[in-house]
Amino acid sequence: MKTFIAKENQVDKKWHLVDARGKTLGRMASRIATILQGKHRPIYTPHVDTGDYVVVINARGVRLTGKKLEEKIYQRFSGYPGGLKIIPLKEMLERHPDRVVRLAVRRMLPKTKLGERMLEKLKIYDGTEHPHTAQKPVELAIG
């Protein structure tokens, strides 16, 4: 019996729609990361992108548990003295709610070129409108 290895052209990519309003950020991000990687399919192959596309709407309405809204911070460092940027989660949600979701998902994906390609299949929008209606995304139920 031979081991099955999926090829990039054999994978039928589907589109999924996630409404983030009222969903817990971490639980939603882990489910999205699983779909982007293709781990929900029986043909999952670690070195091949077997994942689907995911469209997230209402990113501003994501829910956070505990004291994360007051205590969680995002840090960037430019490499220069005094180049540390600290942005609280509350401010990030007001200014760039799509980045909060993207960073949560990105940190759950592989840190390789393949992980970067997987992240490109994630489309995040602040409101309810999105330009991907032609792809007929299927509503994804996240508990």
Image: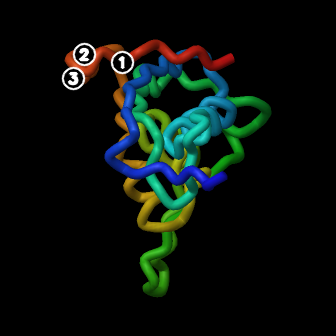
* Residue at 53% over, 46% down: 37
Between circles 3 and 2, the one closer to the viewer is 2
Between circles 1 and 3, the one closer to the viewer is 1
- Residue 91 visible to an observer of this rendering: no
From the image, tell me which residue sits under label 1.
137
Q: Residues within 10 Å of mark 1 (few under 14, many from 20)?
A: some
* Residue at 54% over, 36% down: 35
The answer to whether 126 appears left or right of 102 in the picture is left
Which quadrant of the rendered structure holds the C terminus?
top right
- Residue 18 visible to an observer of this rendering: yes
Q: Nearer the viewer, residue 91 or 111?
A: 111
Helix, strand or loop at mark 3: loop
Residue 54 falls in image quadrant: top left
From the image, tell me which residue sits under label 3.
131
Label 2 near label 1: C-beta < 8 Å? yes
- Say if 117 sits above or below 38 in the image: below
Q: Distance from label 1 to label 3 (Cα)? A: 11 Å
The answer to whether 30 appears left or right of 79 in the picture is right
Disc 3 residue type? Pro
Q: Distance from label 3 to label 2 (Cα)? A: 6 Å
Disc 1 residue type? Pro
Disc 2 residue type? Thr
The answer to whether 30 appears left or right of 93 in the picture is right
**Mark number displayed over residue 105:** none
The percent coordinates of residue 135 (x first, y second) are 26, 21
The percent coordinates of residue 22 (x first, y second) are 60, 16
Q: Residues within 10 Å of mark 2 (few under 14, many from 20)?
A: few
Residue lying farthest right? 66
From the image, tell me which residue sits under label 2.
133
Label 2 near label 3: C-beta < 8 Å? yes
